[in-house]
Image (spheres, grey):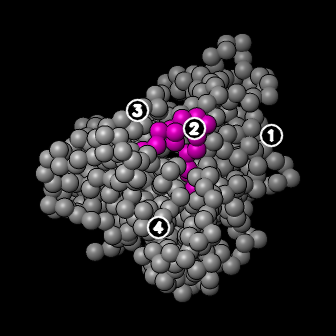
């Protein structure tokens, strides 16, 4: 089984690692097998595999839940009406554990080679994947996960509190391991091109994201740790520009291709949601042209940017216009997949300042907006902040609305942040299911009940109920 996994990984690597510099001494005479995995062997497949999956889930799931877009026509049902399929999280579960197995192999190889930079990268990737996984489901297998070769085929689940304690400690350790003097000696990675400093900044920026995520749990002292990180940038360097951000550049070369095989699959049968577009219109926001198409009447007359209400009631025929859709250019290589950006770091600092822990909330707010424009290739208009809908008023609501747009196309992050803060305020309709209540998590894959029933039942006991309304550990918003 392990050799089969290695074969699959190698084939993926050969396709992805188009910049390989001839490190072929790692291959034995059989071109389909690796004699020994180096710490760098798995990095690019993991990065591309997880990032491309997250990009697709952002459009298929997050956009619907967070009123970015919706399928149309859609007279009934649909995720935008909180009609949640029992197996909606299956692909995230399966994809995450597939690549977590690769991360584990990478870390083992790095430790064996005594390569601290790749060990730090492996710890960071592990934290990134597990954080998203546990924030989708709650308790998940971690301690005994991805150990099939050791005979652990039915792993137990860990509490979300334990998972966060573990990955935060791992990020702390990773920050201490990076060594710019030795560098990263294997083929160039597709995220930071072996820039150790950028990898370290990613580690610490992710650390900040996750501390803020659990900050409503006061017993964790997460806010105090966040403040300590912000006040010691030498020890905890974080992203300081969009150029440093964790943004995967999908080149279209080799296998580094768009997750959408056909551009039309990105926006066919999709319309922009009114909440998303109406707010951008109120902001007179230049990102509209990058994100969306313009609406037209049935004679082709341009109506500007105009969406359709999420979870609308009544017939499809009530909309006497062709509403704005997603601009499919966003899914055509060369394209970007957002993982964690400088804009998000600035909005984290803005929230800390708004809550009185550090200074200069308005400065960080403006920096976040500027960076959010920059990451989409848009120039901030000179009069943007003179708009009363934009001007900082000291409220968390203003920060979170702009953060909502900064997190556009970033896996599940809009949904996670909504569950943490209840912001931005999303409109509800009588056509929404689940009592018009935002799902708090996704239920476990049904095969867990079939093939791992004992551990599944223990996980449900940790949660209380395997229900979409059962809140995860850090979710304390009423």
Give the residue at mark 3: 265
Q: Which residue is mark 4?
A: 283
Label 1, on which residue? 185
Question: Where does the magenta region start and end?
Answer: 326-341
SS at mark 4 in the image: loop
Proximity of marks 1 and 4: CB atoms separated by less than 8 Å: no
Residue at the outermost top position? 29
Measured Cα–Cα span from mark 3 to mark 2: 19 Å
The spot of residue 49 in percent (x, y) is 53, 37
Q: Residues within 10 Å of mark 3 (few under 14, many from 20)?
A: few
Which image quarter: residue 233?
Answer: bottom right
Q: Residue furthest right?
A: 181
Please state which of the two labelled residues, at mark 3 or mark 1, is closer to the viewer: 3
- Identify the residue at horizontal 37%, vertical 62% (top origin): 278
Residue 246, position as x, y percentages in the image: 63, 52
Question: Disc 3 to disc 1, how far (Cα)?
Answer: 39 Å
Question: Separation of disc 1 and disc 2 at Cα?
Answer: 20 Å
Residue 234 in the image: x percent, y percent?
Answer: 76, 71
Is residue 184 visible in this depiction of the protein? yes
Q: Which mark is residue 48?
A: 2
Can residue 164 be seen here? The reply is no
Q: Which of pointers 2 and 4 lies earlier in the amino acid sequence?
A: 2
Q: Nearer the viewer, mark 1 or mark 4?
A: 4
At horizontal 52% and vertical 42% (from top left) the residue drawn is 330
Is 229 in front, or is 112? 229
Above or below, 272 against 34 in this view is below
């Amino acid at each position: 089984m392990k050799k089969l996994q290695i074969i699959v990984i190698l084939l993926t690597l050969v396709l992805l690692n188009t910049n390989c510099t001839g490190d072929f001494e790692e291959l034995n005479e059989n071109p389909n097998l690796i004699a020994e995995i180096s710490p760098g062997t798995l990095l690019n497949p993991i990065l591309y595999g997880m990032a491309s999956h997250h990009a697709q889930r952002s459009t298929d799931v997050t956009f619907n839940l967070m009123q970015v877009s919706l399928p149309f026509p859609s007279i009934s049902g649909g995720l935008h009406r909180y009609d949640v399929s029992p197996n909606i999280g299956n692909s995230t579960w399966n994809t995450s554990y597939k690549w977590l197995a690769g991360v584990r192999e990478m870390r083992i190889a790095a430790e064996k080679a005594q390569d601290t930079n790749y060990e730090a990268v492996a710890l960071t990737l592990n934290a990134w994947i597990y954080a998203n996984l546990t924030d989708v489901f709650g308790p998940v297998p971690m301690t005994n996960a991805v150990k099939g070769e050791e005979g652990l085929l039915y792993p137990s689940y860990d509490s979300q509190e334990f998972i966060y304690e573990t990955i935060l400690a791992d990020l702390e350790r990773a920050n201490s391991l990076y060594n710019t003097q030795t560098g990263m000696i294997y083929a160039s990675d597709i995220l930071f091109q072996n820039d150790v400093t950028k990898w370290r900044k990613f580690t610490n920026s992710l650390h900040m994201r996750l501390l803020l995520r659990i900050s409503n749990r006061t017993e964790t002292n997460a806010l105090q740790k966040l403040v300590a990180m912000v006040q010691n940038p030498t020890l905890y360097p974080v992203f300081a520009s969009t150029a440093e951000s964790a943004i995967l550049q999908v080149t279209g070369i080799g296998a580094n291709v768009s997750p959408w095989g056909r551009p039309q699959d990105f926006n066919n049968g999709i319309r922009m949601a009114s909440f998303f577009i109406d707010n951008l219109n109120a902001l007179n926001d230049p990102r509209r042209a990058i994100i969306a198409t313009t609406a037209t009447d049935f004679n082709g007359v341009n109506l500007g940017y105009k969406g359709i209400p999420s979870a609308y009631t009544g017939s499809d025929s009530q909309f006497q216009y062709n509403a704005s859709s997603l601009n499919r250019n966003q899914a055509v290589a060369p394209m970007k997949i957002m993982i964690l950006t400088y804009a998000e770091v600035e909005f984290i600092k803005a929230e800390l300042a708004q809550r009185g822990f550090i200074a200069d909330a308005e400065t960080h707010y403006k920096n976040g907006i500027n960076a959010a424009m920059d990451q989409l290739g848009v120039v901030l208009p000179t009069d943007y902040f003179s708009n009363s809908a934009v001007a900082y008023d000291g409220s968390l609501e203003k920060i979170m609305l702009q953060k909502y747009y900064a997190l556009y196309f970033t896996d599940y992050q809009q949904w996670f942040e909504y569950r943490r803060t209840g912001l931005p305020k999303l409109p509800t309709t009588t056509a929404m299911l689940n009592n018009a209540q935002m799902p708090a998590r996704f239920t476990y894959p049904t095969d867990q009940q079939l093939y791992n029933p004992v551990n599944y039942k223990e996980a449900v006991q940790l949660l209380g109920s395997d229900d979409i309304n059962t809140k995860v550990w850090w979710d304390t918003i009423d």
